[in-house]
Amino acid sequence: MRLERLVVERFRNLESLDIEVGSPFVVLSGPNAQGKTNTLEAVHLLATLKPLRGRRVRELVRWGDKEAALAGWVDHRGLTRHYRIDLGPDGRSAKLDGKRADDLQEYFAGVRAITFTPSDERVVSGSPSWRRDWLDRATFTAQPAHLERVRRYRRALDQKSALLRRGRADRSYLEVLDEQLSVLGADLVDRRAAMLTELTPHVQELHERIAGSSARVELNLSTSCKGDTPAERAASFAARLAEVRDREIERGTTLAGPQTDDIRIQLDGHPARTYGSRGQVRSLVLSLKLAELVAAGVRGEVPLFLVDDVSSELDRSRTARLVELLADLGAQVFATTTAPEHLSALPESDTLHFQVDGGVVRPTAS
């Protein structure tokens, strides 16, 4: 998939923007706080329907305005489709080819993106929720149907959470909800586990290439849904839910399930979270992100790859290896940097350069 054209109106600090971006590599350069990341966020929002930073729609609309709009034309397998997002007081709405995008699987069939930003270090060093979110995004990127799997589980979990918060929860209703959760949770964990098994060898190979290191990378899922099959996992999860039911009622909150799982990430047998240097963590996180790209590519889909602040996140040698790797993987890449010389290894014939200054995005020579 390739974004051919990007149109932006009243989005963050950006001036009206209408640019052709159909090259394999698109570089956005300029000083800090000028709008490079905001431009990248526009692409991210079109491809994921989520902001890159923050959560409120109000934060995305340019100061002083009430509405903003983004549009993109994406070529996917020879077919160009028109994506549009409108942002306003009532929230966000998405359109595909001029029609409201009610079917998210259809929307994401033609556009997806993987993004690497400075905050992604927390996938390794942060709380378990960062690692769960990474694994669910990786599974979704490879298989968009995973989105509905996650949503079904969260809907059932929200029902149970609401019941527990009321106090004096109806035990019979809790048992019904736990039966549903055991099946939905087992299915979710089974897909996560399969994806992690698929990703691990890709992460190992990518880490060797990016870090120039032969350190052994291990990824293991820590879950309360034990077993090797969905049925075994469901039975195990159901038993665990019965075990903690009294404590959940007493505390008014859920205590077990995929929402508490973690992914243990180790380098040469040591927890990367506590033993990895900052450089090792950066290389590892980038390897995790690129593994998503490879897993999707195996299925014949190559999402967009967005990299924010390349010059601060990677040294020259790692950046050079990354550029070589991205060229091999065949993804369309959008990168922001304050030091475009760090990306000098990009093939000039396949690269578009834009200077971003005061919210204005202008084409420029390399």
Image (cartoon, rainbow, N blue to C red):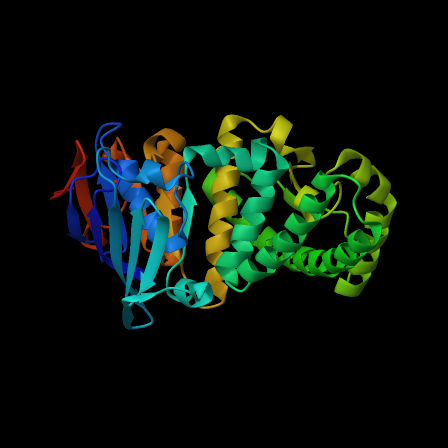
**Percent x, y for residue 317?**
38, 35
> Relative to 280, does residue 70 appear above or below in the rendering?
below
On screen, residue 222 above or below 359 = below
Horizontal and vertical percent position of residue 313: 40, 32
| Residue 310 falls left or right of residue 241 | left
Nearer to us in this view, 326 or 220: 220
Q: Position of residue 92 (x, y in %)?
A: 36, 50
Residue 262 falls in which quadrant of the image? top right
- When asked about the image quadrant of residue 147, the answer is bottom right
Residue located farthest toward the bottom when viewing the structure as drawn: 78
Q: Position of residue 183 (x, y in %)?
A: 74, 61
Q: Is residue 106 visible?
A: yes
Residue at (20%, 46%) from the top-left corner? 9
**Residue depicted at 79% across the width and 64% down the height:** 231
Residue at image point 22% right, 38% down: 65
Q: Quadrant of residue 270?
A: top right
Q: Visible in this render: residue 226?
A: no
Q: Quadrant of the C terminus?
A: top left
Please tell me which residue lies in front, 173 or 329.
Answer: 173
Q: Quadrant of the N terminus?
A: bottom left
Depth check: 111 or 22 in front? 111
Q: Nearer the viewer, residue 65 or 133?
A: 65
Number of marks in picture? 0
